[in-house]
Image: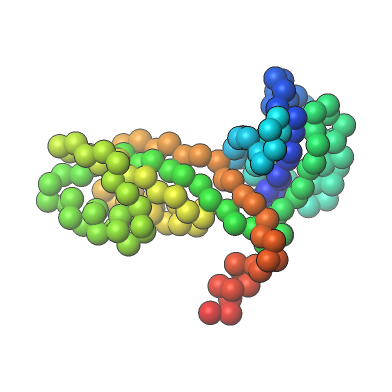
Amino acid sequence: MKHTLSVLVEDESGVLTRIAGLFARRGFNIESLAVGPAEQVGISRITMVVPIEDKTIDQLTKQLYKLINILKVQDITHVPCVERELMLLKVNSPSHKRSEILEIVQIFRARIVDLAETSLIIEVTGDPGKIIAIEQILSSFGIMEIARTGKISLTRESKVSTQLLKEIV
C-alpha cells in the first residue's frame, strides 16, 4: 500500500540526506517527494509517498523520529486531506490536432504555457487522479516530455473526507 507521510523538519542542511539514507538502508523506495518551507520560519515540510506495508509504517515513523532535526511525522494516508500535484507536459501538436488538444486542456482546467509550431507545453495542477487522467488522454497525441512534482498535502481541519463526498454524490 502507498502511504503519504507529512514530516516537519528543522530547515538545516543534511536533513533530507539523513531521511533518504534511512529509507535506502531499509530498502524502501520513495515514490514521490516534495520539500518546501512550512508555515513557521526555519521549518520545512516534507511530503513523501512510500509504497510500504501497513505493519511497517509504525516502525518507519519511530525510526524517523530518531533522526535529528525531525519535529513531527504524520501518516496522513487515511486522514481527510487536500492533495495537489503540478505537471508540465510537452505534447506533439500538429496543426490538425491542436483544437482537439485545446478542448481537452479546457475540460481539465489546465493551461497552455508554451506554444511552438509542432508542440504545446501544458501545465496541469490538481489531485493525483486528475494528473493521471489527463496524462493518459494526451498520450494518444504523443507526449514528448513530462516534468512532475511530488504530491503535496495538508490535512483538512473540517475533517470532511473528499472520498466520502465522492461516494455520496
At a point 77% along the width and 47% down the height, the residue shown is: 74
Q: Looking at the picture, tell me which residue is in the foreground, 2 or 147.
A: 147
Going by the image, does 164 lie left or right of 74? left
Going by the image, does 67 lie left or right of 44? right
Q: Name the quadrant containing residue 45.
A: top right
Farthest left residue in view: 96
Q: Name the quadrant containing residue 168.
A: bottom right
At a point 30% along the width and 58% down the height, the residue shown is: 106
Q: Position of residue 94 (x, y in %)?
A: 16, 44
Farthest front residue in view: 41
- Residue 161, relative to residue 136: is it above or below? below
Q: Position of residue 64 (x, y in %)?
A: 81, 35
- Residue 97, relative to residue 38: is it above or below? below
Q: Position of residue 52 (x, y in %)?
A: 72, 45
- Residue 19, relative to residue 142: is it above or below? above
Whether residue 24 is visible, yes or no, is no
Tally of marks: 0
Whether residue 12 is visible, yes or no, is yes
